[in-house]
Amino acid sequence: MDDPKRVTRPQARGYEDSWLERGARERGRESASRRTPAPSGSAALADLRALLSRRANVRIEATYDKVGEGGALPTFDESEFEGATRAVDKAIGRVTSTWTASPAPPGSTVSPLSTGDILLPNDQPIGYVNGSAGPGIRTVTLNEFRRLQAELLNGAQVAATPLNYSGTWFQRSDGTVFGMRESSDNGITIDVIRSGNPHMPPGFKVHHE
Amino acid sequence: MTLNLLSTDEFFGKTILEYIQAVPGELPADAVGLWQIIPMGRQGFGLSGDDLTEFVQRCVLALLEAGARPVTGGAGTQYDWILQSQYGKAVEEIASAVINEWLAAGAGDSDPGGLWFALPSPHVGNHP
């Protein structure tokens, strides 16, 4: 979809290139220093499958099997990532982007938790503030992040997502709209886009370590 | 100027001044979107009209002065973000252009498909 406001002015090109080039040099050095080992992509998918089957009661068996056995999703080259941690998050992103999460099976007593119960337990924001971020930008461990993903996706439906958003939006039964956004440096981030919970701060985000 | 920089938000008890000073703090980890700033001004601090406009402008200036530049999501490209250079070069020029565009569009809440601000990075590309 073309947006005339997005046209780049030719006279700005030199400025753009110097800002981008400076950033590429500076941030590239910073990224290289943050490499951390992590499980391989296939192991991460197995962990995610076990976690979701055990805790979230989400019907992903058919979708996961399609993903794990050469299904229609595009493959990715793990070697293009600096650390295996990004491969894990990319794998989770590939899986979650295909989900059409369904409600708990008939007869099940497990109902989706409210978004407030998941992200604001006891009315306190989940996780902690990392570095100089504001209080509404939270960080949790990777294991806790996977649990949050599973709980948020329980009963959620895929929602219309802006074309330039690097991820997928979902809507929960309580009306909350959240996004799971992939980035090269951070893996997956949870963006809380809309919420009817009066205690949910605007612009609430959750990163993982 | 009628914006009371010492007003506190109803979520964390931070003042407007503290929020503006802290908003660039996220940049080393992630881009910051107008979808985060505008509703914080409206819902968090109860601002509207000229006060809300001034709040958003001050936040945008803080991000720009920290070295960030306007970007949009890079889905479908090799980048996380795409630089939006149509707002100009100088910090004040960019801030004014961003605010004027927001006001012309009705000064509503943005969403993550809209404008963000990111530091220079290998993951920020030029508009294709």
Image (cartoon, grey):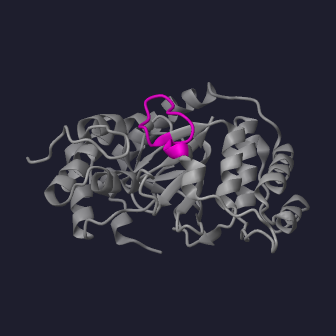
In this rendering, is residue A209 above or below A90?
Answer: above
Residue found 22% across the figure and 48% down from its top: B55
Question: Going by the image, does A83 lie left or right of B76?
Answer: right
Residue B115 in picture, x, y percent from top left: 39, 57
In this rendering, is residue A130 above or below A9?
Answer: above
Q: Main SS type for the magenta part?
A: loop
Q: What stretch is highlighted in magenta?
A: A122-137
Residue A150 in picture, x, y percent from top left: 71, 54
Residue B7 in picture, x, y percent from top left: 21, 42
Residue A51 in picture, x, y percent from top left: 81, 49
Can residue A71 be seen in this snapshot? yes
Q: Viewer-proximal residue, A48 or A20?
A: A48
Question: Going by the image, does A100 lie left or right of A20?
Answer: right
Question: Farthest residue toward the top?
Answer: A33
Q: Viewer-proximal residue, A175 or A17?
A: A175
Residue found 73% across the figure and 58% down from its top: A94
Name the image quarter holding the C terminus of chain A: top right
